[in-house]
């Protein structure tokens, strides 16, 4: 099984089409995809967490 890709905040914001500040606001409000803080202090988001987040945003008509 392939390893899960770790994405930077810039990559996630670009993929979602939102500003970096929007992602940080979502994160502060508990609305952003699950993330992890590396020992060097940088934040990463697993590809699977982003996909799960997007599935949760889907609406059904």
Image (spheres, helix red, strand yellow):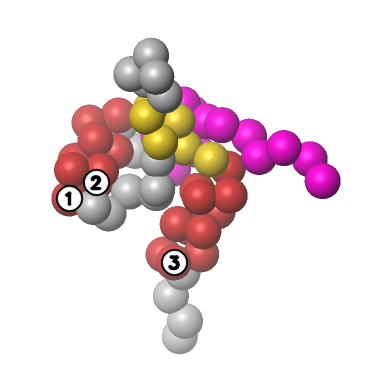
Label 1: which residue?
A: 29
Query: Could one spot residue 10 in this view of the protein?
Result: no
From the viewer's perspective, is residue 53 above or below residue 11?
A: below
Give the distance between the C-alpha atoms of the residues marked 2 and 1, in whole angstroms.
Answer: 5 Å
The residue positioned 51% from the left and 64% from the top of the image is 55
The residue positioned 18% from the left and 43% from the top of the image is 28
Quarter of the figure with the C terminus: bottom left
Instruction: Tell which of 13 and 33 is nearer to you.
Output: 33
Comes first in the chain, label 1 or label 3: 1
Label 3: which residue?
A: 56
Furthest-front residue in view? 39
Q: Are marks 3 and 2 in contact (CB under 8 Å)?
A: no
Q: Are marks 2 and 1 in contact (CB under 8 Å)?
A: yes
Would you identify the image quadrant in which residue 12 lies?
A: top left
The magenta region covers 1-16
Give the distance between the C-alpha atoms of the residues marked 1 and 3, in whole angstroms.
Answer: 16 Å
Q: Are marks 1 and 3 in contact (CB under 8 Å)?
A: no
The percent coordinates of residue 60 (x first, y second) are 47, 81
- For this view, does 23 lie left or right of residue 42? left
Instruction: Tell which of 18 and 39 is nearer to you.
Output: 39
The residue positioned 30% from the left and 32% from the top of the image is 19
* Magenta-span inclusion, residue 32: no
Query: Could one spot residue 40 in this view of the protein?
Result: yes
Comes first in the chain, label 3 or label 2: 2
The percent coordinates of residue 30 (x first, y second) are 23, 52
The percent coordinates of residue 31 (x first, y second) are 27, 54
Label 2: which residue?
A: 26
């Amino acid at each position: 099984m392939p390893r899960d890709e770790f994405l930077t905040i810039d990559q996630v914001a670009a993929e979602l089409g939102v500003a970096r500040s929007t992602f940080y606001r979502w994160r502060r409000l508990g609305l952003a995809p699950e993330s992890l803080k590396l020992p060097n202090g940088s934040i990463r988001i697993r590809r699977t967490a982003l996909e799960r987040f997007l599935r949760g945003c889907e609406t059904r008509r």
